[in-house]
Image: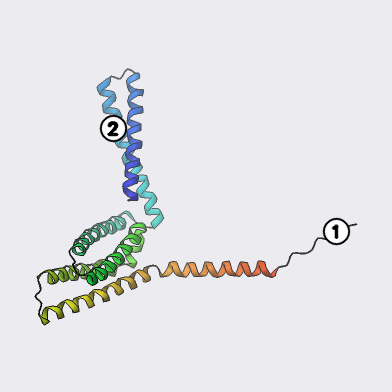
């Protein structure tokens, strides 16, 4: 969402550059056609220059090379497409119990993707999720919805559905564990900052202000 907003802002700025440059060139007796062509070139150049500077800032913030960043974005795009399949499977579920389980799994997947999209460098901490877990999540969920919509009311079908639901629960736990692992350093930093703050408060409380002597 943020990247889309930035591209929109770049477009707005580029449009303003085009309009202003057109008036400057046209009032300078360059002619309508020439002014239009040059102002369009300026606008396109402005847009791509802003995008380049924005990408450089993002790379510097995340301490990534352009090649690494492109590789990560490619994997995030593929993961987003898999997430769409998971959403589709979620809306196909009829059982309230299964809807709850798959809904929780869906939310866990969304949280991991949200963290990595915000900070692309975390992709390398979540590579197990992207290359193994997400595929299992999507395939298992699609398998469950297929079985639930086509299964017969016999013991074997009920057993297959029950086993699949159990696997979905285990996968949800595994994804949550992966997310906790990705954020573990953040919690450690937060804990250290909290200890420093508590120590500072303790020191301030132990220092009693001296009474100001009043002179007659």
Seen in the picture, residue 71 relative to 128 is either above or below; the reply is above
Residue at left offset 43%, top offset 68%:
185
The quadrant of the image that shows the C terminus is: bottom right
Farthest bottom residue?
Answer: 155
Q: Residues within 10 Å of mark 1 (few under 14, many from 20)?
A: few
Q: Which mark is residue 214?
A: 1
Distance Cα–Cα, label 2 vs label 1: 77 Å
Residue sitting nearer the eye, 191 or 144: 144
Marks 2 and 1: CB-CB under 8 Å? no
Q: Residues within 10 Å of mark 2 (few under 14, many from 20)?
A: some
The image quarter containing residue 170 is bottom left
x, y percentage for residue 37?
A: 26, 27
The answer to whether one can see residue 49 in this image is no
The image quarter containing residue 136 is bottom left
The image quarter containing residue 202 is bottom right
Mark 2 residue element: helix
Left or right: 36 in relation to 16? left
Mark 1 residue element: loop
Residue pointed to by mark 2: 41
Give the number of marks: 2
Residue sitting nearer the eye, 94 or 3: 94
Residue sitting nearer the eye, 175 or 90: 90
Residue at left offset 69%, top offset 70%:
206
Residue sitting nearer the eye, 209 or 161: 161
Seen in the picture, residue 24 relative to 55 is either above or below; the reply is above
Q: Earlier in the sequence, mark 2 or mark 1?
A: 2
Seen in the picture, residue 201 relative to 120 is either above or below; the reply is below
Q: Mark 2 or 1, which is nearer the eye? A: 1
x, y percentage for residue 138?
A: 20, 67
Left or right: 139 in relation to 14? left
The answer to whether one can see residue 65 in this image is yes
Farthest top residue?
Answer: 29
């Amino acid at each position: 969402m943020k990247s889309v907003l930035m591209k929109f802002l770049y477009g707005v700025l580029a449009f303003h550059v085009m309009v202003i440059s057109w008036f400057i060139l046209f009032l300078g007796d360059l002619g309508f056609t020439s002014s239009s062509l040059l102002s369009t070139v300026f606008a396109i150049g402005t847009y791509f220059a802003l995008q380049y500077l924005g990408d450089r800032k993002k790379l510097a913030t995340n301490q990534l090379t352009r090649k690494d960043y492109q590789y990560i974005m490619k994997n995030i795009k593929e993961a987003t497409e898999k997430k769409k399949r998971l959403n589709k499977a979620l809306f196909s579920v009829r059982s309230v119990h299964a809807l709850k389980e798959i809904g929780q799994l869906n939310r866990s997947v969304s949280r991991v993707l949200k963290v990595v999209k915000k900070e692309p460098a975390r992709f390398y901490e979540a590579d197990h999720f992207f290359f193994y877990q997400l595929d299992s999540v999507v395939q298992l969920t699609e398998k469950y919805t297929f079985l639930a919509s086509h299964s017969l009311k016999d013991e074997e079908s009920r057993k297959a559905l029950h086993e699949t639901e159990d696997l979905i629960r285990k996968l949800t736990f595994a994804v949550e564990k992966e997310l906790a692992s990705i954020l573990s350093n953040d919690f450690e930093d937060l804990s250290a900052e909290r200890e420093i703050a508590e120590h500072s408060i303790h020191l301030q409380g132990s220092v009693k202000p001296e009474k100001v002597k009043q002179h007659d």
